[in-house]
Amino acid sequence: MSVTVDVSYKSLNKNQEELCGDKVEILKTKDSNIIILADGMGSGVKANILATLTSKILGTMFLNGAGIEECVQTIVKTLPVCQVRQVAYSTFSILQIFESGDAYLVEFDNPECVFIRDGALLTVPYKERMIEGKCIREYRFKVALNDCFILMSDGVIHAGVGKALNFGWTWQNMAEYSVKATNSTLSASRLASILSKACDDLYMQSPGDDTTVAVARVIDSKPVHLFTGPPLNPVDDMAAVQAFLEGNAKRIVSGGTSANIVARVLDRPIHTSLNYTDPNLPPIAYIEGIDLVTEGVLTLTRALKLMRQYVEEEVNEDFFLELDKDNGGSKIAKMIIEDCTDLHLFVGRTMNEAHQNPSLPFDLSIRMNLVSQIIDTVRKMGKEAFVKYY
């Protein structure tokens, strides 16, 4: 079994704080995914520094093969000491999931991870160890397809204290809510957003503590193939389409000329939708056997805007409403964000004279610039991206 992991997280800053005192690091090694959630003592700048130092140190050491004892010793000796409390304090959770299906989780003073398997809470045994006077929980287990793991800072289980709830959300209530949300969502990003919104609502949009949820879901590999732009030499049309059609993947064709090439090679008609759901974007079309057919540059630009928003901004419910809209740009972005582990682009180098000066080299063209930005953004999501030019 070769495991693929979908990872996402969302944080709420404590009310009136510009910086979050929680920090999440998502790392990939050649054979595993690592998620680190660190929660610095207090809030604001000091907590942010403590959490950032902790997550960066742990990440660097784990990537270089250090054991948990060495990591904890380094954290204890490295973090600055709080002058008020006389302790250097940052709690943390580290989850490492290997492609083989083996998994390792270590927790220090963070709420316990929520394990969900087959639509129900799963109890995973752990061992306690004392390292440098700190009590550490260690879990070793095997993952299964569709498993879901939720790491959290203590702001999650304290959500609503003194406001919507007398004693906070509690771990058990949060875990039961997570099971329901997991059963109704497909992606880690949407689940993280749902759980974060629940916390925000319990805090009545005024969080009393930094609050972070990090979600990891074990999924099947989900390749997406995107074909855009006619090949420079028409002789290569057949080869480009055949490469685009290889393997088991969801397929997107972006661009009118590209769609005509695919339809010709497949000897299938194109049916254009008359449903103009967005006045700023041309409607989508249909070719039998292709999952999505759209216009080119305008639609890819809209898709890129949404993908960059997902990577660079704090996404909320409004973002997912935009992602669910019935237009080509939202559909491309949604497929790549929520239903893709690796994106394969098949890009023709012929330029559209309507978009730029044909005397310019291809690498200065609008489409090439879009492709480069899409690749960069997809990789920032933690997904693989590959491109082949024709």
Image (cartoon, helix red, strand yellow):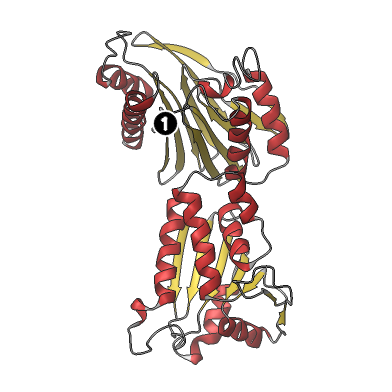
Q: What residue would you read off at disc 1?
A: 20
* 108 relative to 205 in the view: left or right: left
- Looking at the picture, tell me which residue is in the foreground, 292 or 103: 292
* Residue 135 x %, y %: 43, 11
* 205 relative to 51 in the view: left or right: right
* Residue 240 x %, y %: 52, 80
- Looking at the picture, tell me which residue is in the foreground, 147 or 317: 317
Residue 77 seen in the current view: yes
* 330 relative to 119 in the view: left or right: left
**Above or below, 55 relative to 29:** above
Identify the image quadrant of the C terminus: bottom left
- Looking at the picture, tell me which residue is in the foreground, 220 or 224: 224
Q: Secondary structure at mark 1?
A: loop
- Residue placed at 56% from the left, 36% from the top? 215
- Residue placed at 69% from the left, 87% from the top? 267
Disc 1 packing (10 Å; few <14; some 14–19; many ≥20): many
* Residue 118 x %, y %: 72, 35
> Where on the picture, by quarter, is residue 66?
top left
- Residue placed at 65% from the left, 41% from the top? 146
The amino acid type of the residue labelled 1 equals: Cys
> Where on the picture, by quarter, is residue 386?
bottom left
**Above or below, 349 relative to 117:** below
